[in-house]
Image (cartoon, grey):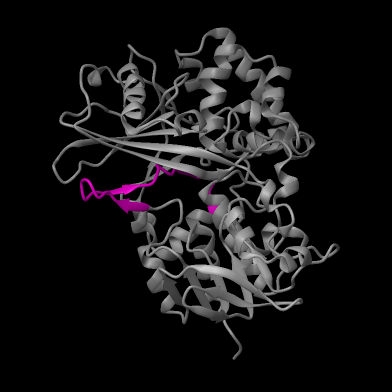
Amino acid sequence: MGPPIVIVGGGLAGLAAAVRLTEAGREVVLIESKRKLGGRATSFVDPRSGETLDNCQHVLMGSCTNLLDLYGRLGVLDLIEWHRTIWWANPPGDPDEMTPSSLPAPAHFAGSFLRMRFLGLEDKRAVARAMWRLIRLGREGRERWKGQSFGRFLEETRQTERARSHFWEPVIISACNMPCARTDASLAMYVFQAGFLQDSWSPVMGLSMRPLVELYDPAQQFIESRGGAMRLGVSAMSLSFDGTRVRGVVTDEGMVEASAVITAVPPDRLAKLCSGTLTSADVRLGRLDEIAFSPILGVHLAFDAPIMETPHLVLPGRDTQWLFRKERDAQGRHRVHAVISAADSWMDLDERAIVDRVMHDVHWALPRARGLQPVAFRAVKEKRATFAGVPGIDALRPKAKRDGVRGGVENLFLAGDWCATGWPATMEGAVRSGYLASAAVCGRSGDRCEDALVPDVPAAPLSRWLGL
């Protein structure tokens, strides 16, 4: 037996690759600089309170077929709580409810959408006009919008200002971590086509009932029981390249020889692992520094009294996009997790200023919270949370394996949500990239969904007939 397959990075992409490879009987060594798994989608112990807090709230949808597959392999699906309804704040009244009905897709949201009160009749007409356009565009039409902004699509479909600020922006900022004007149209269109319009299961929302890190706890036993090895708390320093092949990974504990290497780290981190010689030898590595990032801010709030009745709440037209009701902490306090995506303007604020700004939105959205202040709080900044899905980003997103025409390093494979998956920066995109990389290592094409990925949720017959 030769050297193992070495995976650099223990986030979802690296874990997905390790799970699939060990299942296939391959010897794997996973290297992770932290002493816990999950990457950016994990938890930490707050030194102030001793509570385990998520870095940020992460959501999965019914359309996340590969993420659900990974959770199934790890045996943690029972930790996911599913919600068919999405609640939208509309004070001083009760929240509006967006729930799929028994009508066939793409009409399944029509009834609840028409009943939503935070949009006027002209706003709803504008949204319906854009939705119909998205349905008729289908995949081919979506591809033609690559390189243009979703904001241009909204202008072309004559969206009202309120429809844009109260409906389109909250969805796209949450899904793509970018405002509509800066998001590549094809990525935003995919969110609505595959996530909302094509069937009634895809938009169902899943939330972990436990800290995110507990979803990955079984991964180490899963991988090691199948002959793999986990080296946590070990930092990769560079990739050893002999001019033709990657020979291994140089770590702060020495060299780890490899028959193949999968890098499952962000592009800026990958660039630091690569020598100039390696970068010149593989066309996928030449433009890593052109991939920009977008920040996310998560704010954990604890109250002495309950303030939130629904499990989650969208805040249309506000700086804070989502609130999530969490389980009580060890002191019995009621916890709420606020999420601000595309949080560029928040990054220079101190924690007190952040909490004051969030509480302004909380008091607006939740009547029961008015007059109350949190008894404890914690703001978590992720300055480089996701890649920035700007127009033209697809030209920078590399495939898992080397380019067959332009060449590259044969035994170097790339993974991460920023790689070419067709998805925005999501947990599903990360898992897809890991599955694609593992399939490429095993000698399959690694480029086609049917070769490596769990199939997507099929479109409903009417949606398919209309063009989706």
Q: Residue at x 42, y 64 (%)?
A: 74
Q: Position of residue 59 (x, y in %)?
A: 44, 43
Looking at the rendered image, the quarter that the N terminus falls into is bottom right
- Quick one: 51 or 194, which is closer to the camera? 51
Query: Front-most of 122 and 30?
Result: 30
- 284 lies left or right of 64: right
Side of 194 where 280 appears, left or right: right
In the image, taking residue 123 as reference, residue 78 lies left or right, namely left
Number of labels in the image equals 0
The rendered magenta stretch, by its main secondary structure, is classed as loop
* Residue 386 part of the magenta segment: no
Residue located farthest toward the bottom when viewing the structure as drawn: 1
Which quadrant of the figure has residue 130?
top right
Is residue 20 in sight in this rendering?
A: no
Q: Is residue 52 magenta?
A: yes
Is residue 14 shown above or below 230? Answer: above
Please state the horizontal and vertical placement of residue 115, each as a whole percent of the image: 46, 16
- Comparing 396 with 103, the one in front is 396
What is the quadrant of residue 440 in the picture? bottom right
Q: Position of residue 205 (x, y in %)?
A: 44, 40
In the rendered structure, which segment of residues is drawn in magenta? 43-65
Instruction: Name the residue: 56% across, 31% down.
Output: 172
Is any atom of residue 318 visible in this view?
Answer: yes
Q: Position of residue 292 (x, y in %)?
A: 62, 43
Image position of 47 with respect to 403: above or below: above
The quarter in which the C terminus is drawn is top right
Name above or below for residue 138 compared with residue 37: above
Instruction: Please tell me which residue is depicted at 16% across the width and 28% down the height of the picture.
Output: 305
Q: Residue at x 55, y 68 (%)?
A: 237
